Amino acid sequence: MAQIKLQNVEDYYEIGEVLGSGHFGQVRAVLERASGVRWAGKFLKLRRSASSRLGLERKSVEREVEILQSLQHANVMALRDVFESRAEVVLIVELISGGELFDFIAEKESLSEEEAIEFLKQILKGVGFMHTKNIAHFDLKPENIMLADKMMPHPHIKIIDFGLAHRLKQGEEYRSLSGTPQYIAPEVINYEPLSEAADMWSIGVITYILLSGLSPFQGDNDEETLKNIVGMIYEFEEIYFNQTSAMAKDFIEKLLVKDPIERMTANECLVHPWIKPLTRKQAANRSRSSINMKSFKKFNAKRKWKMSFNMVWACNRLFRLQLQCKSRSQEDPELVREQKGLGLDQEKCWLLPFLLKSKTCRTNCVLSGQSITPILINRNILINYMPWKEQKQENYTPSRQMLHPYFIILLYLLFELL
């Protein structure tokens, strides 16, 4: 079990390149000095006061640490060390380099139900172990189901991101409205007491998507999606489930149950006939069935595009923040602190040079060509925005790097969807 250390993290680990960054900190590659083993360091900024909007609440970080400390399992991201200072907490966690499970599957030409089941078994074992510790994840979704190393013959599943996880205590009711709309259970939307069964609903949704390439409750917007979930409005459309076995549909139906008490538990899932066939006939039916790869690839591409759009919007939000900081630095020191907290360079901003929401396009940008991979997950093009006037001052000359902004947009999206 990892013990919280008050020493400097650099006394124990050599800090390497940035793997990813977010609103509350960075993820960096780190090398353990004593063993030479590579890990990932999550550098999380803490709020300096209760009224501050910057950083995470110490209580939420402590909860995540406490949960990870008690989850030593092959299918759960491992926590190695914790370092704490007044301003930040550093979590030294397992370096997960295989990317998302759904991305790995989307690269395949075909996938049988038997192969899909091998991945689901690992997910169920990891979630089942959490539940034996009375811990619910509350944010199970494709982005949080990773592969330790996709080059292995039989890739190992790792469940990550325990920011919304909670230890449920007997006699205490826990309610939360947090989660991702497509994957949350009806009781979350209705603000009812939650249990581990909310995770099982999410596994049902993930299985439905995995087999068909469709999201069962997806609406045109979040409001419609939530209405579909509460109303239990979903079906097995023949065009998408024509290669799916009856046992697989039964498995999903026993998870997408409105009453949490009636849902299968993780252990019950592991002995369901689809996961563990009882007869040769059941095994034969399963081996002849496969997932709808054409539809699945479309779903995954759309999912990645949406993530790209959100990232673009967030990047440009940071750019606007930078402009505000420059113009209001004397008037609003809090904004400057926020900018610095996000790791923005005062002179140059690494981001995509266009604003999708306002339909504005910032021209004359230089393509950096670098790649950033949060825990080696996503591949993103970084754009070094520098106005043409500044480029002249720094003796820039037009070259192949100078790309039309709309071409940059197209290139970025294609890069994300490949």
Image (tube, grey):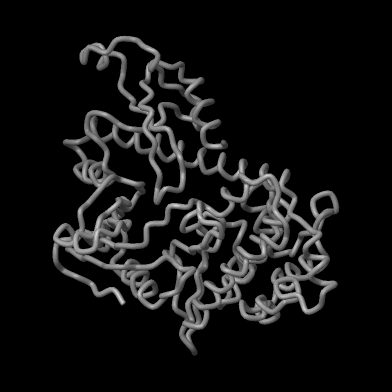
Left/right of residue 100 with respect to residue 72 in the rendered view? right
Residue 263 placed where, x, y %? 68, 77
Q: Residue 384, located in which quarter of the rendered image?
A: top left
Q: Nearer the viewer, residue 29 or 115?
A: 115
Residue 194 seen anywhere in this rendered image of the structure: no
Left/right of residue 243 with respect to residue 400 in the rendered view? right
Residue 103 seen anywhere in this rendered image of the structure: yes
Work out which quarter of the rendered image holds the N terminus and state it: bottom left
User: Compared with residue 246, is residue 103 higher up or lower down, i.e. above or below?
Assistant: above
**Total label count?**
0
Left/right of residue 106 with respect to residue 38 in the rendered view? right
Could you tell me which residue is drawn at 50 percent across and 51 percent down? 151
User: Compared with residue 283, is residue 358 higher up or lower down, i.e. above or below?
Assistant: above
Q: Which residue is at the far front?
A: 153
Residue 139 placed where, x, y %? 52, 63
Could you tell me which residue is drawn at 47 percent across and 82 percent down? 133
Could you tell me which residue is drawn at 76 percent across and 66 percent down? 248
User: Compared with residue 173, is residue 49 higher up or lower down, i.e. above or below?
Assistant: above
Work out which quarter of the rendered image holds the C terminus and state it: top right
Could you tell me which residue is drawn at 34 percent across and 10 percent down? 398
Residue 158 placed where, x, y %? 48, 63
Q: Nearer the viewer, residue 46 or 44?
A: 44
Q: Nearer the viewer, residue 100 or 398?
A: 100
Q: Which residue is at the far bottom?
A: 171
Residue 316 placed where, x, y %? 40, 34
